[in-house]
Amino acid sequence: MTALRNDLIYLVVFAVAVLAMPIWLAPFGAAYPDLMQKFAIYGIFAIGFNILFGMTGYLSFGHAAFLGVGSYAAVWSFKLLSMNVIPAIALAVLVSGLFAAAIGYISLRRSGIYFSILTLAFAQMSYNLAYSVFTPITNGETGLQLALNDPRVIDRALFADAPGIPRPNLFGIELGGYEAFYLCAVILILCFFVAMRIDRSPFGMMLKAIKSNQTRMAYTGFNTRPYTLSAFIISGIYAGIAGGLLAVTDPLAGAERMQWTASGEVVLMTILGGVGTLVGPVIGAVVIKYFENIFSAFHMAKLEDIFSFLPDGLESFVVSIVSPFVGEGWHLTLGIMFMLIVVFLPGGLMEGARRIRARFGGGRGTGSKAHSSNPAPAE
Amino acid sequence: MDQLILQLLNGLDKGAAYALIALGLTLVFGTLGIVNFAHGALFMIGAFCAVVFSRLLQLETVTIDPARLTPWGSPMEVRTPLVQAWLGDFGAVLVQWSVPLSILFAIPVMLIVGVAMERGLIRYFYKRAHADQILVTFGLAIVLQEIVKANFGANPIPVTAPAALAGSVDVGGWLGLSGVFYPWWRLVYLGFALAVMGLVIAFLRFTTYGMVVRAGMEDRQTVGFLGIDIEKRFTVVFGIAAVVAGIAGAMYTPIVSPNYHIGMDFLVLSFVVVVVGGMGSVSGAVFAGFLLGILQSFASMNEVKNILPGIDQVIIYLVAVVVLLVMPRGLMGRKGVMEN
Amino acid sequence: MLIKKINRRVFLQSSGIVGAGLAMPMILSSAARAQGFCNNPTGSKVVFGFNCPQTGAYAEEGKDQLKAYELAVKHINGEGDGGMLNTFKGTALKGNGILGKKVAYVTGDTQTKSDAARASATRMIERDGAIMISGGSSSGVAVAVQSLCQDMGIIFMSGLTHSNDTTGKDKKKNGFRHFFNAHMSGVAIAPVLGEAYGKERRAYHLTADYTWGWTQEESIKAATEALGWQTVQTVRTPVGAADFSQYITPVLNSGADVLILNHYGNDMVNSLRQAIQFGLRDKQVNGKNFEIVVPLFSELMAQGAGDAIKGIYGTANWDWKLENAGTKAFTKSFGEAYGTPPSQAAQTGYVQALLYADACERAGTFNPEGVVKALEDFEFDGLGNGPTLYRGSDHQCFKPVLVVQGKEKPKDKYDLLQVVKEVPTKTVTYDPSIFGGELGPVGTKC
């Protein structure tokens, strides 16, 4: 029973932390709706990715395809049916689930690196075709967007037309910045809860058993495929929800969401935060999106402003030291951070949190025990 | 007919590039067990070796001439090239042939880079999870890219082949056909690639050193028990992989102008080639490189594209899927390598 | 909605404790709704948002553009030598900022990806209170950011975007483009090609397989066919293909005697250099010299292409070697500040920033309603392109288009292109209805 209570505390702490983002992110200059939406959405994406990678050990390198498909589905729902987000998310779930089922069914015939390359190949094919040949469906490079003369059959049947392009809504409540953030936050908490239930369930145990030794599982006469396929589809649906929410917060779906760099990004988020931990992937997502959005926005004049409290000579010295790492150099900072974390905190940021807790004798804390992320060595 | 020959040459040429990159990657990936996302960066560094070398040869002294003005009114700089000034005509020849000569420059540079990478970073990751390897090598790749970007800018840098090899040659003439012309430099690249691949494969197959390395791939522990310092050999393997990637990059510069993310562009492709070839098989990677290159060329022909629009964009991935579904371990993969 | 209300209350309570500083974002956003239009500047400053590619293939153009914006802000605020502000005929700007407010700016990285560009623009609008967004080096990004700005009630002054769609199919009331487009390129270059290469030519197109490439191909094809040229084949190539050999070899024996490369950026650099390595320009077909045409040129890409660019025809929006007062003033202040002449990406950005500032000053407000009205059908001169019209019906600038050619003997690496012809505005003007699209109403609310 204590395990259950710990989980409850864990969930409540997580929920409070997510909902209170506008407060505790403000000192970091990140408390504006768009970025907080991105934190929540990519958090969902990474949690879902971890259900596959963290639990079963199958490393998919094409998960962005499901995100992209979910986005396209949601925007098409806005265009054809209604600006209400419920049908949009539902359609995103349906389409990404089907897509994941098809790709998973084929890719899971192989394991290890062969599986990774199969998923990568499917995602890259989706991306290349979406960018070019499928332009009538995806609007290619520009991305699928809403237009004034979209059919929106349900909306048109029920309401009178307002001027301009309508915004996504939840039964009449227009989703502006903060409203959309809270919608994403609530869905993130739900997704976190579901992931936690999966992790603690017999199904989750089975997945972890597959990760630790698939051959042994097979020798016991156990067919692992239905389990891995279910995990694949669930994590594909998580990606689809994330994609759908991206379209809800910003109704434009671009092909580059499916590119391998996007797939690689979620892999990095998960590893950075801590593979196999529940909250780690969310933290990884927050860190990477933070760097992308905040570090890239500095420029010389702003730096000079920040360091203007220093004496003149020192100021220009500090600015010249800092400037290669921000603005156009934000990639450099990101790369250095990846290396430092993996060198000093094997197991990701959650490992760091665990070490801090261990040092200060907090012991078990909220129960987010970092699972050993080391699969069997390759040799 | 001549179209088919030309496309075959294109395919061989592309395949040579793919195979060269995959060759080094499969050494570290299939044999050392390192998922090296920085391999593309090694290719990129090699390409910039060629850029740096030709710039070294074209170093200039700069003097300010106050008599002449730039359009915005500051005094104009006058530049005199040094190498030509010292060596005269021979200097000019050196400048002309800077790309092939840059291999001599790239080999030691890449060896140092490769060994430094392995000793400084990679060796701590042999026993770590693949996830950690991905993160650290990806981080390293970004850092290397950004360093190059900070020094050379983001634009592609034009690099020219020696004038004698810049034009095209009547390949058809050799075969008794008319009107089949092909650029000299691409033929040179093909020959160069074949030579390098032959050398590496021969090294692994016919020398005792290579034999120990191959044994180490199979079973590192036992080789260790025999009292052989397998770690040192792995450093050498990593160094070779870096050199192969680097000189592949240096020689490729006249074909594709290098910029700082040229390595990233090749990275995904090289992983696909390695895996289609089969994990742990060097000749598999080479074969897969040529196969994918040739198929890509033929898929780009108008006759094919008219039937299947967009096929040229996905052919590589499509072939990868088909091969991996039909042959569980790629074309020539060994059992048990990277299957977990 | 319940959740949101609870949290707002929780938030307000706690913000009392945490301190007013933390409450900024919420207050700002609710204030924005009350003030009539988005990000109405109330203090002594007004914020511009410059959204340029700083990583990826167009990073160099983005960097150049950012320099130009920096310069523009300085000049609007009355610092530096004033640049084109001195030659901008009849401007309302006084060199003391806009409507008495000093201009500040924020920057962001578009990464040449629609998603990243929109995220970056949203940050500038939501967090930094930007009143206007400008910049970019690709049409996909421009169209994506333009529609975002429309929805968020911000003015978008696009940077380097050449697709017909930006002010055609996807035009928006809040979006304005100073740069020219593919249609104008086609109309401008066709007569020059006819004169140089004759009226009986057979053209082969290689086209980057995305929206800009397609509009470029369509426009140049129509213009050359009107001239009497035949189109042998149009082939789509994947973006970022790096090696184009498999698309170039079919050109050799296709019977075509002109190759038109509808590529930009790295694709253009690689396909042009490779086409020349395949000996296309040394060939004789149908008794004529084989020629290559690159409809859209840029100085930075010409640097990347090196010698390959010599003698090749293309079009440009602007060139720093033009002989007019505005160009000279701009080239001088840019060169003094950064040591290189400005690229056309820089010029279009600089001019866009000035035009926006001037429109606000003339309208007497930052309200997009007023600014749009001030910019629509605005005629101006002295900004480097000669007399120019911002057409009200599609928010496209009309001015002379430059036909340029790669120089045979460049003096240095900034002297790669020479202007062959300035095609007058009248020739390149077209009927806005040919591209469809609808401007819609002005967006003002956040």
Image: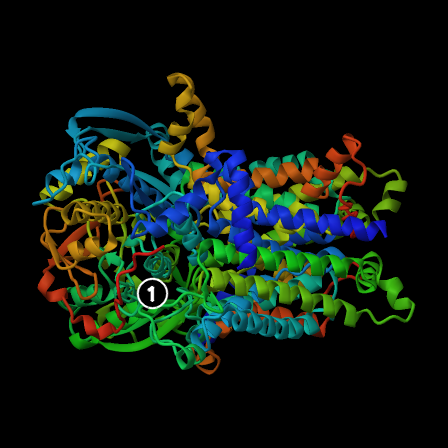
Q: Residue at x 69, y 53 (%)?
A: B201
Q: Describe residue A174's horizontal placement relative to residue B109 as left or right.
A: left
Give whichever of C368, A179 is nearer the camera.
Answer: A179
Residue C342 percent location from the top left of the image: 24, 42
Residue C295 percent location from the top left of the image: 26, 62
Classify residue A229 by image quadrant.
bottom right
Q: How many marks?
A: 1
Q: What chain letter is assigned to the residue under label 1?
A: C
Q: Residue at x 45, y 66 (%)?
A: A168
Q: Residue at x 63, y 44 (%)?
A: B137
In the image, is residue C19 above or below residue C305? above
Residue C124 percent location from the top left of the image: 38, 46
Residue type beneath disc 1? Trp
Task: Name the residue that disc number 1 marks.
Answer: C212
- Callout 1 secondary element: helix
Q: Residue at x 69, y 40 (%)?
A: B122
Q: Describe residue B333's horizontal placement relative to residue B162 as left or right.
A: right
> On the rendered image, what quadrant is the C terminus of chain C found in?
bottom left
Q: What is the crowding at mark 1: few (fewer than 14 residues within 10 Å), some, or many (at least 20)?
A: many
Residue C355 percent location from the top left of the image: 19, 48
Q: Is residue A133 visible?
A: no
Give whichever of A369, B160 is nearer the camera.
Answer: A369
In the image, is residue B17 above or below residue A343? below
